[in-house]
């Protein structure tokens, strides 16, 4: 059994910061021992990694990605191969992607399709959520089987009528089923019916630029849908996880629900913490790069999101990585913002941007690790295999240099997309080395992994319930 020792670093988990050496045996964390103690110096090893001056972190868990997602007549540009490689470059060693049920088809067919896309191609480990597009007797029954086999969370949409949208009755039925089978409903909370009216009116009045995508997807319509989702979950007796929360009033709805003791959870994404409607309004057609749903909001919302992350009103930061190239894909919406494929690249820079938030004083180091590693692992039934550094956990470990400076750019990123949403942004902190189950994937900033190393992760149910 191969043995690796990581020595001299500061091990940071959601609960502790300790100057400890880490022993890895056969792909798992075997032991931690205080640096310099007899216990640590007595370990024999095949490989020693000097982590002096760095943080030793659990691998990041990005619980919201869309590799190769079909959307708006095109496909998200990252495959499972390119997307998981880019994830590894950024210190993320687990993704949970969304398999899609097509209207009129079974959950099983959708899941099989996503397994076929990912199998043998991933650089790091991966699991699946299931998007429920067609809630009916048969798909409700299938939910039970999926939970039993490790697909334990189901995304429903209050937005995108005619595509993924479910009405309140269907949502209630899915929530009732989840309350019985242990599944977690993930909600895209925007009132899509009302938004479509505003889209039609905007286009008829000649308001066709990307900035109007933000205008029509109003804060009130995110807050209203969030409120409704909470009440439906309450009636069903089901837990609820609200994805990609962008608006202050939606945070308020989640906070109010949690205050009442309801099992309601919230996720936000780096784009809502670092970007704003100013980006959507960039001149020319540049704003198309920032079209995603929920949309970017005015800057004032950011402080509420940071506060929510600090106060545990929001528990998780995922990327909602759904990249479309500017050239040929985002351009499909020139002259009609509603035809711009929704989504942004981000899987590579979540850990770095959140570390910048530590540098800027928005978050503590442990909270950084909590919202990016431990909480998503617990939320989606992967803890403590993923999300921490403790004996028995998978040896998914990131050696992170907190003093390295880097400039984010499409020139240097590894995602298969022709622009960066953070082009030219300077951040402090960078991944140096990444291990996945003890195997180097990134070594001293060189990619040494391979497609097919990443294995499928059947998941348990939410560990916050
Ligand atoms: O704009 C987004 N978020 N695209 C991906 C699909 C979704 O709603 O998460
Ligand atoms: Zn969504
Ligand atoms: Zn998404």
Image: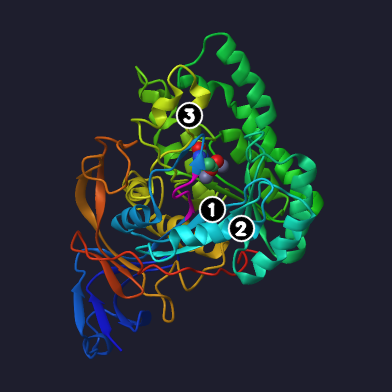
Please identify, in this view, whether the residue under mark 1 or under mark 3 is nearer the observer: 1
At 19% from the left and 60% from the top, the residue drawn is 446
Please identify, in this view, whether the residue under mark 2 or under mark 1 is nearer the observer: 2
At 34% from the left and 17% from the top, the residue drawn is 284
Task: Name the one closer to the observer, 204 or 382.
Answer: 204
Observer able to see residue 95: no
Instruction: From the image, tell me which residue sits under label 2.
Output: 109
**Residue 151 in the image: x percent, y percent?**
60, 64
Instruction: From the image, tell me which residue sits under label 3.
Output: 300
Cβ–Cβ below 8 Å for labels 1 and 3?
no
Ligand 3 near label 1 (Cβ, under 8 Å)? yes
- Helix, strand or loop under label 2: helix
Q: Is residue 255 magenta?
A: no
Q: Tell which circle, 1 or 3, labels the residue nearer the N-terminal end.
A: 1
Q: On residue 98, which mark appears? A: 1
Task: Name the one closer to the observer, 396 or 68.
Answer: 68
Q: CA distance from mark 1 to mark 3?
A: 30 Å
Q: Is residue 198 left or right of residue 316?
A: right
Q: CA distance from mark 2 to mark 3?
A: 43 Å
Q: Is residue 330 above or below residue 144?
A: above
| Residue interval drawn in magenta | 63-69
**Residue 123 in the image: x percent, y percent?**
34, 63
- Helix, strand or loop under label 1: strand
| Mark 3 Cα-neighbour bin, 10 Å: few <14, some 14–19, many ≥20 | few
**Residue 458 in the image: x percent, y percent?**
54, 70
At 59% from the left and 68% from the top, the residue drawn is 150
Observer able to see residue 146: yes
- Helix, strand or loop under label 3: helix
The N terminus appears in which quarter of the rendering?
bottom left
Which quadrant would residue 188 be assigned to in this image?
Answer: top right
Which quadrant would residue 411 be assigned to in this image?
Answer: top left
């Amino acid at each position: 059994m191969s043995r690796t020792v990581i020595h001299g670093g500061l091990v940071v988990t959601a609960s502790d910061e300790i100057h400890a050496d880490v022993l890895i045996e056969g792909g798992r964390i075997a032991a931690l021992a205080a640096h310099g103690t007899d216990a640590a110096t007595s370990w024999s090893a095949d490989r020693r990694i000097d982590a002096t001056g760095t943080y030793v972190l659990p691998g990041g868990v990005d619980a919201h990605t869309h590799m190769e997602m079909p959307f708006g007549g095109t496909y998200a540009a990252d495959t499972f191969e390119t997307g998981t490689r880019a994830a590894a470059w950024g210190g993320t060693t687990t993704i949970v992607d969304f398999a899609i049920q097509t209207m009129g088809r079974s959950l099983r067919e959708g899941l099989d399709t996503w397994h076929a896309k990912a199998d043998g191609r991933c650089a790091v480990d991966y699991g699946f959520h299931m998007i429920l597009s067609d809630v009916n007797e048969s798909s409700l029954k299938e939910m039970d089987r999926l939970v039993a086999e490790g697909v334990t969370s189901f995304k429903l949409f209050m937005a995108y009528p005619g595509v993924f949208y479910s009405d309140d009755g269907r949502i209630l039925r899915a929530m009732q089923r989840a309350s019985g089978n242990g599944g977690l409903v993930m909600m895209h909370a925007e009132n899509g019916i009302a938004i479509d009216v505003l889209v039609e009116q905007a286009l008829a009045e000649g308001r066709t630029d990307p900035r109007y995508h933000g205008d029509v997807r109003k804060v009130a319509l995110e807050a209203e849908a969030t409120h409704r989702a909470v009440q439906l979950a309450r009636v069903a007796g089901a837990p609820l996880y609200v994805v990609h929360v962008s608006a202050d009033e939606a945070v308020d709805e989640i906070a109010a629900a949690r205050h009442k003791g309801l099992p309601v959870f919230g996720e936000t994404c780096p784009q809502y913490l670092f970007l704003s409607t100013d980006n959507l309004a960039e001149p020319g057609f540049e704003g198309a790069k920032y079209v995603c749903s929920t949309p970017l909001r005015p800057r004032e919302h950011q402080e509420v999101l940071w506060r929510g992350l600090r106060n545990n009103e929001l528990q998780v930061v995922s990327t909602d990585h759904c990249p479309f190239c500017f050239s040929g894909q985002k351009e499909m919406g020139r002259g009609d913002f509603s035809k711009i494929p929704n989504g942004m690249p981000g899987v590579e820079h979540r850990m770095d941007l959140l570390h910048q938030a530590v540098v800027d004083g928005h978050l503590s180091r442990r909270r950084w690790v909590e919202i990016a590693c431990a909480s998503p692992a617990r939320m989606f039934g992967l803890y403590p295999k993923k999300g921490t550094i403790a004996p028995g956990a998978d040896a998914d470990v990131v050696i992170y240099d907190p003093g390295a400076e880097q400039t984010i750019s499409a020139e240097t990123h590894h995602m298969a997309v022709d622009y960066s949403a953070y082009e030219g942004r300077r951040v402090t902190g960078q991944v140096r080395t990444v291990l996945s189950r003890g195997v180097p994937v990134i070594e001293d900033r060189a990619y040494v992994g391979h497609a097919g190393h990443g294995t499928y992760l059947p998941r348990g149910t939410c560990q916050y319930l």
